[in-house]
Image (spheres, rainbow, N blue to C red):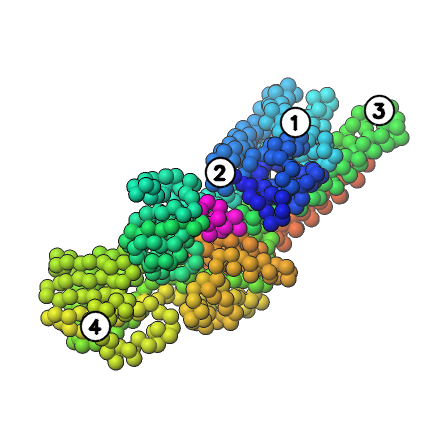
Amino acid sequence: MGIRLGTLNNTSERTLDLFGMTCANCALRIEKGLSKMEGVSDVRVNFARESVFLRSSDSVTLDSLLEKVESLGYSALVHDANKQSETEKKQKEHIRNLKFRFLLSTILSLPLFYGMVTHFSFLSFMPMPHFLMDRWVQMAIAFPVQFIIGFPFYQSAYRALRNGSANMDVLVVIGTSAAYGYSVFGKDLYFETSAVLITFILGGKWIEHFAKGKSSDGINALLKLRPETATVKSNEIWTEVPGEYLKLGDLVLVKAGERFPMDGIITEGESFADESMLTGESMPVEKKLGDQILGGTVNGSGSLVVKATKVGNDTTLSHIIRSVEESLGTKAPIQRIADQISAYFVPVVVSISIIDFLVWYFVITPGIITSAIETSIAILVIACPCALGLATPISLLVGTGRAAKRGVLFRSAEALESVSKINWIAFDKTGTLTEGKPKVTEITQDGLDASALHLVLQNIVEMEKTSDHPLAKAIVGYGKANNLFIESAAMVSTKTYPGGGIISEQKGNVYIAGKREFVEENGFLISESIEESTKPWTIDGSSLVFVGIRGGINGMVVFRIEDSLRPEAKAAIAELKSIGVEPTLLTGDHHTSAEKIAKLVGITSVHSGLSPEDKARIIKTLKTNQVHSAMVGDGINDAPALASADVGIAMGTGSDVAINTADVVLVNGDIQRIVDLIRIGKDTVINIRQNFGWALGYNLLGIPIAASGLLAPWVSGAAMAFSSLSVVLNALRMSRWK
């Protein structure tokens, strides 16, 4: 239920889902507020994930934590790693609400925005309905935008001020309220200024929250690997129980094709297991009496009885989920820069506006309040943070669009900042540097002439169609590629032996296919020519399928099955080295296979036989040494490392877990695009910094001019709009870069 014992005595670790945050300052306030509670330590609020992880003594109750969050002006729920429905429901509801408010605000603001163009002489030729310039009409249109649609801004600003700080919403509220209020009581109309500002900022918040809502998809995909039910032996009867109620020592029946609901030891049966989602090993792993089973992996063929040794949050899969959650919880988006600036910028601007009002009212135009109000509003309007708020999202939009055309999808704003700093990159092997699909690369045979070999291969392919073993599928794929087909009716009988192979009788011939030991156990001797042919294959770590034939035809065929190297892998590694990025191989595969692939692509640093946690640990170690790391992977086993790296890069052809955990997705699985994404990231970060320069430049230049009385409020509003336009145009300019 999101609560587990920590490493310290009498200490608990808790994760809460948060609601109501609008900026990084909100996260900072919650973090500070919780840190002040007696017995609470190590508070980490993640704005992007909308959650908080903390450690506390057992004396700190859950209710007291929830009440503290409530007192700060937000709400929280206990994070449940197994059941996230309530949190997801609230998050989706919030995103829908933001979208509705943005669209409604846009509809209401358009006529006001259209009316504003009459201020510009070069657009005076455009027809302008007279009623749109009526004060009461504009006030009626702007009122719901300002005070109904924009009400959450007032709530956020109030919470910030009540807790002794200021966020972007404070300046939004002051600036738009001043523009609206002056329009009601002054001689000029600035309703469009307030309405358009609120619309722009709502659009940015909607995009931001929509992106944040996607960050939980990786966890949800992992949770789906847990079977909802398990078949348990009770009083000598097999009955189904919910998977979450499994106990240590339970005997669980797992049929062919089913996922294992827990970690355990096999007590009955033989089979093979597809563990690629956890270990990265592309080949199936033989499982027999006494072997260990990992929860979430898939049983191949044959039923197994497994004794539960780890259940619930203690399983390997649960550890991976927890590792992904904690790694994701350390991230913060690049938008934090604007909020950090606002923490100082907002109170400074408000102070300048107040001082300016007093100077005008008491010194420059004594007793004339109109001039004092106009200059104060001009300062607030020109300082309004629309351009500052747009600086990051608009560059992100253009940068991600540019990347998408190259087959690269950025899933987080931080990735754009981080990819430009990458100097070390780790690759998983299976499905990343290799295709992830076993294929027959060579065959050798003994005792068969050309015509007999063709017939034997046809029969072998037809026999292997009856098996769901990955190696059998590789042989069937070989048959399709070489047009080796016969009618299935030619087979008299076929029997599968889990963990061994297949025996099939076909028109007076017996075919025995499988591991070398299985074929030998069934009466075949491996000839000297077969020994010589297959010895280098064995050294290279290839998988071999032996097929012995006796009857009318006598002989043997051996298939060499490998996970083929991606054709672009070698060139991609060379390009990365050319721009100063050091590649490393991190894989769960055995050393021989790893070294072979690394040598083929030009990687000299190799770590093999790694668990998912091992991969993540290596990357975390590099972080402490100030190395900017990236991880490229495609499987569930890569998820912790993808989350731990500064940038996680997933193959679009990989698992949903990897894709949803990563910051960047290579849509077509083309790793040559990694160099493109690094260059695009650098360009985008440069563009964002330029936008911050434009946005702050207008403010810093415009504030003193407005304070001197040289800018009317409407001119300030136009300048503010132009600053936003310049930021947009600068970002669009990036789309033309090569």
Which contiguous range is marked in magenta?
311-324
Label 4, on which residue? 524
Circle 2: is it few (<14), some (14-19), or many (20+) Cα within 10 Å?
A: some
Query: Alpha-carbon distance for marks 2 and 3?
Result: 60 Å
Q: Position of residue 91 (x, y in %)?
A: 52, 35
Element class at badge 3: loop
Q: If you read the primary sequence from the N terminus, does the residue marked by circle 4 or circle 1 appear first?
A: 1
Type of amino acid at the residue the image marks with label 3: Ile
Position of 621 compared to 515: left or right?
right
Q: If you read the primary sequence from the N terminus, does the residue marked by circle 1 or circle 2 appear first?
A: 2
Label 1, on which residue? 191
Q: Is there CB contact under 8 Å for labels 1 and 2?
A: no
Q: Is there CB contact under 8 Å for labels 2 and 4?
A: no
Q: Position of residue 628 (x, y in %)?
A: 60, 59
Q: Is residue 114 above or below residue 641?
A: above
Q: Nearer the viewer, residue 131 or 527?
A: 527
Type of amino acid at the residue the image marks with label 4: Phe
In the rendered structure, find residue 368 and report the number of the disc placed on it: 3
